[in-house]
Structure formats: structure tokens, C-alpha cells
Amino acid sequence: MTTHRREKDSMGAIDVPADKLWGAQTQRSLEHFRISTEKMPVSLIQALALTKRAAAKVNLDLGLLAADKANAIISAADEVLAGKHPDEFPLAIWQTGSGTQSNMNMNEVLANRASELLGGVRGMERKVHPNDDVNKSQSSNDVFPTAMHVAAVIAIREQLIPQLNVLKSTLNEKAQAFSDIVKIGRTHLQDATPLTLGQEISGWVAMLEHNLKHIEHSLPHLSELALGGTAVGTGLNTHPEYAVRVAEELAAITGQPFVTAPNKFEALATCDALVHTHGALKGLAASLMKIANDVRWLASGPRCGIGEISIPENEPGSSIMPGKVNPTQCEAMTMLCCQVLGNDVAVNMGGASGNFELNVYRPMVIHNVLQSVRLLADGMESFNAHCASGIEPNRERISQLLNESLMLVTALNTHIGYDKAAEIAKKAHKEGLTLKASALALGYLTEAEFDAWVRPEAMVGSLK
């Protein structure tokens, strides 16, 4: 049995494994870019298949592609979208910066498979041509950025935003449930004036609400598609109606509000939409890192830390210290947030480094964007299920720390002045006294006045 077949492209002939659907350009990329292990993301492969499907349908409708070929390409693309042929897309992220080789990988696979569906063979005698038919009305320069936007929008809307809403809802429920628990506040890692545990958590909820708005605000630009710009944005070799109709077809297929980019030169020359979107993802990572850090500090202990809240004990925490349990969900969250922050640097550099009519950092940019979306979505799902949903207050510890705090003295400012209040706090701290004992010893107020004026529950503002 023959193990290889001979394929040709504009560079000449090359041997391709006989059992593979890809062709010459994919094989050249495999041989020339044996760099690391990162492969083109599956979601990007799916987006390329969606793009090819939409293009074939519009080319058919415009009378540019024969019905038998168009329908075979559509059927082949549907097979890819159904999860078939996963091993036919082996190319590395680290390839041509335009994504041309991955575009041709998809063209070759769909051409060979479509040929088989038409009763033909794969290879040079195929009935469907990868460039003339599958890539009709297209260039890698508009296909790949289109697939990038399609993949990112779908991932954000279908994976990230739902998990963000779930975590936000969980924390909001905790904020409401703990609205009556007065605790000591902390600024600069030092004791501050009181607030409720619910108020503290409500700040986390508001952070996530703003993150959601920022992400959603970035999506209209990301929903603009480059398809129809072809090589440099002029639309060379396309039908006048093609760009609008192919964007409408992608919107219909995906259920997402895709539109044709009003300026194809911007759409090809930049990654600005993805830079903007990833900036919003970076903001979410910064918020989640702060929330996770707050949670693990508040849960620190169990006997020698702050210990104001308890979080679920999910697994043993030490290979040497028996009984130790660690805030592992917080640690996983903070690590993945670090990765997202690092990804943002790469995305920014890639976005800033395009030249003239084409950005050539695209595979790296979309790799980082999709990784960030996946990390944040999975991280929030895990953090919500195994940490946030199980947060509970330790009321005795909260009360103990509240009553020991010297910063309750702030309530006396408006009654005896800042200087005398500070003197009370300093004396209490130096001599190990309670605030009340210090105040009475200094003679600045009576016991009744102290009890009336220093009331933590009256220092937390509106509880609504």
C-alpha cells in the first residue's frame, strides 16, 4: 500500500501522507515550522471552517461557484464543524504571521474532502481546487482576521460571559446574606473603620459588573469582519455584494451580530479590535486577582490568621504538615490571572507591530486571546463552584477583631476632635488597654458618652 502521494503547489512537488486530507502547503509548513508544541486552537479551526462555509454559500448564491462544488465544500466544512477530521489541522502557532498556512490547510482539507464527496479522489486529480474553489473571493489576509474575530466573539459570548454572570450572581447572594455582619475594615493592610461583610463583597460584585460592561463594549468592533477585503483591503476579485452578504451569512450561521467591516484597510492592517478586547480581559483578570487575594487573606488561619471567613476545604494542602488545608482555588485563580496579564503584553506588542497593509502577528495574537478567554472562563467556573459558593462568615472571630480594633476611635472625631481621639488610641495601644478604658483614664468623656458614640453598627453607613 502506498504510504504517500505526490502533491504540487507553486513551489513544486512534495510528498504528502496518503491518508491525510491536507496538501502541499500544509506539508511544507509542517516541515519548515517544527517549533514548540502549541497548535492552532480548535476554536480558530472551527471559525475557519465557518468562514469557508459562508464563503461557499455566498459564492453559490452570486453565481460564482457551481452548485455541486459549493454544496460539497459546505458538506466538508460541516464535517469539520461536527468534530470530524481533527488530526487534519496539525500546524503550529509559530508560522507565517498572516496565518496563510492555516488558511491553506483548511482550503486543502476541504478541497480533498469535497472531491471525495463528489466521487473523486484526493490529491492532484481532485474535483475541487483549494484556491480556485474553496478560497474563491478570498485571501488569507481577510480570511484569517475574520476567523480570529469569529472565534473570539463566540468564545467570549458563549464561554466567558456566562461564567462571569454566574460568579457575579454568587457573590451578590453572599453580599445580601452577610449585609448585617459588621466587621473591621482594612486599608494599607492596617486596621480601619468598620463596614459590613456584605458591603465588602458588594465591592467585588461591582467590579465584575464593570468588567462585564467593558467586555461587552468591546464586542461591536470585534464583530466587524475583514472578509471581502482580499489582499490589501480593496476587495480585488470579489463581487460588489460579496462582503456584506458573507458577513450576513456568518451572522446567520453563528447567531452572532457580525457585520462587514466599514473600512477593510483597518481590518487587515491592524489587530486593534483584539487589542481593545484583550484590554478588557486584562481588566477582568486584575479584578479577579484582587478578589481571590482578598478571599484567601480573609480566610487565612485557621488559628493564626485573619480567619473572618471560611472557604471550602477541598483537598489536603501539604505533603509534610498533617491536617493543613490551603486556599488552592484562590491560588489557581491568581496564577491564571498572571498569565492573562502576561498575554496582554504579547497581544499589545503584536497589535503594535503591523506594517503598512497587513498585521503579521495574527496567529500569536489569537492564540493569546483565546487562551485568556479559556483561562478566565474555566477559572471563574472552578472558583465559583469550589470556593465562592462556599464562603461563610466566622461571626465570633469577626466580632473579636472588631472589638479589639483601635480604629473605632474615629467615631469620636466629631465629638472631642482628632487630636484627643488620636491620644486615646495611642494610649490604648501602648498600654494594652481597651479604647473605653483609655478614654476614661484620660478623662475626655464619660462611659455613657463612649457607649453612645462608639457604636460600630452606626459607623457603616446605609445598608441599602
Image (spheres, helix red, strand yellow):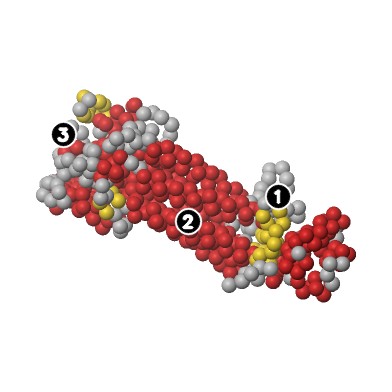
Image marks 3 and 2: residues in contact by CB distance under 8 Å: no
Dot in front, 3 or 2: 2
Disc 2 packing (10 Å; few <14; some 14–19; many ≥20): many
User: In the rendered image, is residue 43 in sight?
Assistant: no
The span from disc 1 to disc 3 (Cα, nearest Å) is 67 Å
Name the residue located 43 percent from the left edge and 34 percent from the top edge.
37
Spot occupied by residue 451 in the image (x, y as percentages of width and height) = 79, 72
In terms of sequence position, does the residue under pointer 2 or pointer 1 come before the other? 2
Name the residue located 16 percent from the left edge and 44 percent from the top edge.
238
Disc 1 packing (10 Å; few <14; some 14–19; many ≥20): few
Q: Relative to 163, is 437 on the left or the right?
A: right
User: In the rendered image, is residue 210 in sight?
Assistant: yes
The image quarter containing residue 435 is bottom right
The image quarter containing residue 458 is bottom right
The residue that mark 2 highlights is: 211
Query: Looking at numbered disc 2 in the image, what kind of residue is underneath it?
Result: Asn
